[in-house]
Image (cartoon, helix red, strand yellow):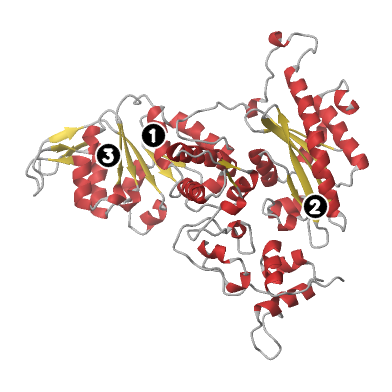
Amino acid sequence: MKALTAPSGLEVTLAKVVDLLRSFLQMRHGIISLFDSDGELEITVGAGWTESCGERCRTYLPRKAIDQIVATDTPLATENIAVHSAFTAADMEVLGVSENIPVSFVGVPIRVDANVVGTLTIDHVLDNGSRVWLDYNLCLLPLIANLVGQTVKSHRSFDGDPEQPMAQQLPKQKHPARQRNKIHVEGMIGDSLALRDLLEKVAVVAKAKIAVLLRGESGTGKELVAKAIHELSPRAKRPFIKLNCAALPETVLESELFGHEKGAFTSAFNSRKGRFELADKGTLFLDEIGEISASFQAKLLRVLQEQEFERVGGNQTIKVDVRIIAATNKNLEEAVARNEFRADLYYRISVVPLLVPALRERRSDIPLLAAEFLKNFNGENGRMLTFDPSAIEVLINCDFPGNIRELENCVYRTAVLAAGPSIGRGDFACWQGKCFAEALHKSRFGKIALQSPPIVPLPAVAAIPPAAAAVAVPPEITSQPPLGPAGAVHLNGARMTDAERVIEAMERCGWVQAKAARLLGLTPRQIGYMLRKYGIEIKRL
């Protein structure tokens, strides 16, 4: 407490706290990180901090783990970071993790009032007492973080003269490089750097009458981005018309876009305006534009160039003033190279290309999105479900190849099958209603995401409970995880059974489950299932 109340700058005060912790805790690195109001890393201090070593301290920050602590507002602790999904290969490299130097880690959030403003993290070389070390620090560090939060609040409230009334103080000036304009767009939820970068570009592009091409995977919200461009443009009070080009055959698509005259075809009983006419003086959003045929591309190109067309079955030229926003999840450059998409049309629609980030590139937004989807579910179904931290951890560690659309489906499906008032790890279920959360974590083969049917079984050797049967497996996974050149068969050439492969892996790794799990391409929990399933007794060496 004495270190926190000393009359010195915030960085110096926090460095003294880390120095003090280092004097009575077993740890290699201890770091306090604080973020500004925009979520940018503002202060990073460690033991022996000086103004010149702030950047060096940042190199010891496992950024994915830090983001998870901030997003979930819960502590993160692991006995060995090498087997935890919150740590990337880059994190393990900067923390000096190897086969010879495994590392334990504890990180806790620092709060000011109800907001997470930073983290306190420490790490320690793994030894026989690491479990006790984790338990002790999980009790101690939240208390320290609470005191640090009060100190941060005090310093930020009285950043000028402590004796000057708060009402007369000027707001703290941020570094120019960190100043960002917050742009709010209805329906777009999140505060990640990737999303803010996109919205800043949207705000700039919206002001000019130019064609925009939205690139990105399916389910990332390209239609919402198109609507945001329209609503931030001078055309905001004019129509915003949208059309999915992949949903209609070419003959119907022509009528939908250009309209038709009475009697133009069998069912044309009346004249009808097309989407171009309806969007006059406004914006036309053409989704899945990469799916239109070569013949229709030529017709569309003429309209985009001349801003004029004739209705189907008509001969009167109609002029319009329409801004085009197109979207696709295809690689149009490759399509142009294969002569599947006209190069002149590509250049016409791609004046300003914008990439909409995938959900896995903005993981810190997942808790906000999931909470919004659960709120909608509760409102529609008269429920009062909530997420507990274990559920958020599962969601953050999913890749979600279907992006936001898949996350929404996952939340709704899990909420329907949830047994209690709070959704936890065990509530994530497949269509058979069985838990398969364990299959969501990182394995040797990469991350396995929450998937809907069709059901594809996992390889038998993984010995994940039957609940994992609804998880899609990447095609490169073979029926047996590799054990290395000497571990797959007996000397007589016969293929080993699953139990024999587990026993051999355990023996090769000195009966250390974590090492054997890495050798087999499994998680420690999965190998624990296999040991219990086959009744294998763990040897104590």
- Tell me the quarter of the picture where residue 22 sits: top right
Amino acid type of the residue that numbered disc 2 sits on in the rendered structure = Ser
Upstream in the sequence, badge 1 or badge 3? 1
Amino acid type of the residue that numbered disc 1 sits on in the rendered structure = Lys
Residue on which disc 2 sits: 104
Residue on which disc 1 sits: 227
> Residue 442 or 324: which is nearer the viewer?
442
Alpha-carbon distance for marks 2 and 3?
60 Å
Upstream in the sequence, badge 2 or badge 3? 2
User: The C terminus is located in which quarter?
Assistant: bottom right
Residue 511 in the image, given as x and y percentages of width and height? 80, 70
Residue 41 shows in this picture: yes
Residue 247 in the image, given as x and y percentages of width and height? 29, 50
Nearer to us of marks 2 and 1 is 2
Q: Is 246 left, or right, of 508 in this rendering?
A: left
Residue on which disc 3 sits: 304
**Image height check: is 402 above or below 511?**
above
Query: Which residue is found at the position 43% from the left and 31% from the top?
Result: 205
